[in-house]
Image (cartoon, grey):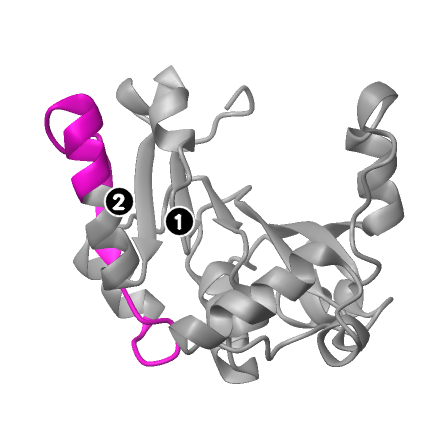
C-alpha cells in the first residue's frame, strides 16, 4: 500500500477479508476477488448479511481455474494490466494442474504493470505424497475428498526461484516452514508448528524490454 499499489487481485479468494479491512480499497485502490462460483456465491451472501449489501468497491470474478482462462475472465471484469498490481494466491496451487499453474504465472508476468508482484503458498511434492503427519495437511486431504479437489501440485524444495525466474520474475523470496515458524510463532505460540514441506514465495515481475 505504501509503495504505490494501484490494484489488488486475490486468486482463489475464499473468505479472505483484506478488501474490507483496509480503507485504501475504498479510496481508489482496485480490488478484484477471483474464485470458484460456488464458493463466491456463499461469500456474497455472507457479505450482504454483514454489510447490508454487497460491497461496491470490490469486483467479483467467478472462475474454475482448471477449466477457464484467467486472462479472459479478468479482462472481462475490468482488470487493468497497466496498473501496479499485487496478486495474492493463497491456498490454491496445490489443487491445480501444472498447466493451470503455468498459465497463471505466465499471465501475471505478461499482463501486469511496472513494479507488480505476487505472493503464493505451495507445498513440496514430498509433503503431498507422504504420510499426513501434520494435522492441517491431514484435514486438507479429508475435506478435499468431500469437495472433489485433490492435493496434486507441488514444487520441489529449493527450485522455486529457478521456476519463477524462468517464467518472467525476479527478486524471488522464499519462506520455508522454519522461517515461517520463526517469523510468526513466539512466546505463547512457540509450540505451534508449520508442516515441513509448506512454504510461501513472493516475486516481482521483471520489467519488459522497450523498443
Q: Using the image as rendered, state which of residue 197 and residue 8 is in the foreground.
A: 197
Residue 144 position within the rendered picture, expressed as x and y whole percent measured from the top left? 49, 70
Q: Using the image as rendered, state which of residue 204 and residue 185 is in the foreground.
A: 185
Extreme-left residue of the structure: 53
**In this picture, residue 63 sits left or right of residue 113:** left
Question: Which label's residue is closer to the chain start, 1 or 2?
Answer: 1
Magenta range is 45-69
Q: Quadrant of residue 30?
A: top left
Look at mark 1 in the image and give the residue it sits on. Answer: 13
Q: Nearer the viewer, mark 1 or mark 2?
A: 2
Task: State if disc 2 and disc 1 touch (CB < 8 Å).
Answer: yes
The relative height of residue 180 versus residue 96 in the rendered view (above or below) is: above
How many numbered marks does the figure carry?
2
Residue at 15% from the left image edge and 32% from the top image edge = 48
Residue 37 position within the rendered picture, expressed as x and y whole percent measured from the top left? 23, 62
Mark 2 residue element? helix
The relative height of residue 69 versus residue 186 in the rendered view (above or below) is: below
Look at mark 2 in the image and give the residue it sits on. Answer: 43
Residue 32 position within the rendered picture, expressed as x and y whole percent measured from the top left? 31, 44
The answer, for residue 210, to whether it is visible in the render is: yes
Asked if residue 85 is among those painted magenta in the image, a careful observer would answer no
In the image, which disc is placed on residue 164? none
Residue at 20% from the left image edge and 43% from the top image edge = 44
Amino acid at each position: 500500500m505504501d509503495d504505490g499499489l494501484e490494484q489488488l487481485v486475490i486468486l482463489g479468494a475464499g473468505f479472505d477479508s483484506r478488501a474490507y479491512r483496509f480503507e485504501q480499497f475504498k479510496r481508489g485502490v482496485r480490488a478484484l476477488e477471483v474464485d470458484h462460483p460456488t464458493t463466491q456465491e456463499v461469500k456474497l451472501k455472507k457479505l450482504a448479511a454483514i454489510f447490508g449489501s454487497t460491497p461496491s468497491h470490490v469486483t467479483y470474478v467467478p472462475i474454475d481455474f482448471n477449466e477457464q482462462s484467467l486472462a479472459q475472465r479478468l479482462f472481462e471484469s475490468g482488470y487493468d494490466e497497466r496498473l501496479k498490481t499485487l496478486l495474492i494466491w493463497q491456498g490454491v496451487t496445490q489443487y491445480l494442474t501444472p498447466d493451470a499453474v503455468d498459465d497463471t504465472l505466465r499471465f501475471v508476468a505478461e499482463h501486469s504493470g511496472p513494479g507488480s508482484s505476487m505472493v503464493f503458498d505451495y507445498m513440496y511434492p514430498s509433503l503431498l505424497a507422504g504420510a499426513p503427519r501434520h494435522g492441517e495437511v491431514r484435514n486438507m486431504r479429508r475435506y478435499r475428498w468431500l469437495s472433489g479437489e485433490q492435493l496434486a501440485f507441488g514444487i520441489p524444495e529449493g527450485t522455486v526461484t529457478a521456476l519463477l525466474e524462468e517464467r518472467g520474475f525476479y527478486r524471488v523470496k522464499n519462506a520455508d516452514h522454519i522461517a515461517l515458524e520463526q517469523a510468526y510463532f513466539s512466546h505463547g505460540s512457540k509450540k505451534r508448528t508449520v508442516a515441513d514441506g509448506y512454504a510461501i514465495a513472493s516475486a516481482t515481475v521483471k520489467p519488459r524490454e522497450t523498443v
